[in-house]
Amino acid sequence: MSSGKAHQTYVSRRELLGTMGTGLGLLALPELVDAAANPLAVKAPHYQPSAKHIIHVYLNGGPSQIDTWDYKPELNKRGGQALPFRNLATERETGVALASPFKFKQYGNSGLWCSEIFDKTASAHADKICVIKSMYANTPNHEQSMRLMNTGDERQSRPSYGSWLTYGLGTENQNLPGYVAMCPGLPVADSSNWRSSFLPGIFQGTYLDTRKVKVDELIANIKNSRLDHDSQRQQLDLLAILNREHQKPRWEDANLEARIQSFELAYRMQMEATDAFDISSETQATQDLYNAGSVHGRQLLIARRLIERGVRVVQCFHGDVQPWDTHGGLDAAMRGLGKQADQPIAALLTDLEQRGLLQETLVICGGEFGRTPAVEIPIGGGNPTGRDHNHHGFTIWLAGGGIKGGYSYGNTDEFGYRAIEKRTHVHDLHATMLHLMGFDHEKLTYRHAGRDFRLTDVAGHVISDIIA
């Protein structure tokens, strides 16, 4: 999607002027002008997609795979014994094997294993879910691994996958952003999880602080309390004239165009966003299904309402900072987290299916890494009751949007420490996500600083085995 590549639909002003310099280029001028004037206009992917939307349920902090979806009976047999690894530490010192305190069983016709932590999700949807048990990342640190999961790079200099998809596809609803990120507060690595970086700013995720219950407060300053709609329109028109004059000698600066487009989007969002975020119009049965009185339930219900209205990508971060970071008190912490997350996730899948939206919506659930099978030794002493970070092997699951349901892909070793079978890097997950949304991950590129960048950098392959 860079200059000279196939799938050139968004053009910068520099590219537009270059095209106008040739006679043949003038034949496509109206289309190019429209694309330059509205970067969020609907664009065609490289090929027919399996999915039109993504809802990413992000479990902040690194949920334990061996206490949820990756059943390891050998670990439970060896509880309290030394494990056969030279060094199991990732961030902190670890000790003997820590057996899972949770009950596991097989669910659905497929027989997927899951613990009681996600009993409702597995009971209702095991045969729709594909569990990737062989994920691995690069580092055991939250900030770097969260950026890797959400932007494809551990540094703060790359666009999020949601920004890449909005850049590639635009939005189906011009009165709403193409990409929304919801969190009750901020996750680790904060806005770098949904930033646009060197992509034009209009493709950045719109952040909603879901600690705020009132619809008008979800997006700060979305409504002008002093001016009516017509007065705002006049004000924006004047501002646009001034900005365009300021922009003329700076036509190559994409940030100026992004600022202008952001003002326009904010104006258009005032009515549409209020409606999309207002769950009071949902039936009581639907609100109860999601447990919409809870923050996470409300987030996932809003997510469904957004994709129903054409938003491309919605990220729902479960809890601020890192609640799934269970260094201690694993048993009580996981039970509490499961109580918060399980019912809303099960409800989301049920609701999407009933509305005919699951087949066109890719649902992803997981965190930035997993946990160690060995107990973590507490700093300063004390009773060891938790697990350390583990980037060597963890679990992500997907459903809908062209995914093979009731399927378990890859595996970790017998203790759940390291991915050993069909190892799947985060770049592979991203390549597969782009593929399902209709893109060749090697061709969705953007020219920056003298080179063509892409979400998967110079790596990644599509996991064809998990595609239906």
Image (cartoon, grey):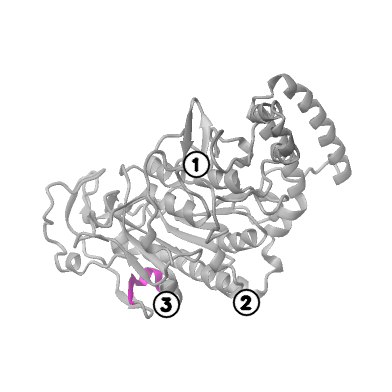
Does 142 sit left or right of 359 as displayed?
A: left
* Residue 37 shows in this picture: no
Cα gap from disc 2 to disc 1, whole angstroms: 34 Å
Cα gap from disc 3 to disc 2, whole angstroms: 20 Å
Q: State the mark number for residue 130.
A: none
Q: Residue furthest top?
A: 249
Does 435 sit left or right of 17 as displayed?
A: left
Please tell me in which quadrant of the rendered image residue 297 appears: bottom right
Percent of width and height locating residue 273: 71, 53
Residue type for callout 2: Ala
Residue type for callout 3: Ser
Q: Quadrant of the C terminus?
A: bottom left
Give the secondary structure at mark 1: helix
Q: Quadrant of the N terminus?
A: top right
Per the image, the residue denoted by label 1 is: 190
Which badge, 2 or 1, comes first in the chain's sequence? 1
Residue type for callout 1: Asp
Q: Which residues are magenta?
A: 111-120
Cα gap from disc 1 to disc 3, whole angstroms: 33 Å
Tell which tag, 3 or 2, sits nearer the viewer.
3
Per the image, the residue denoted by label 2 is: 285
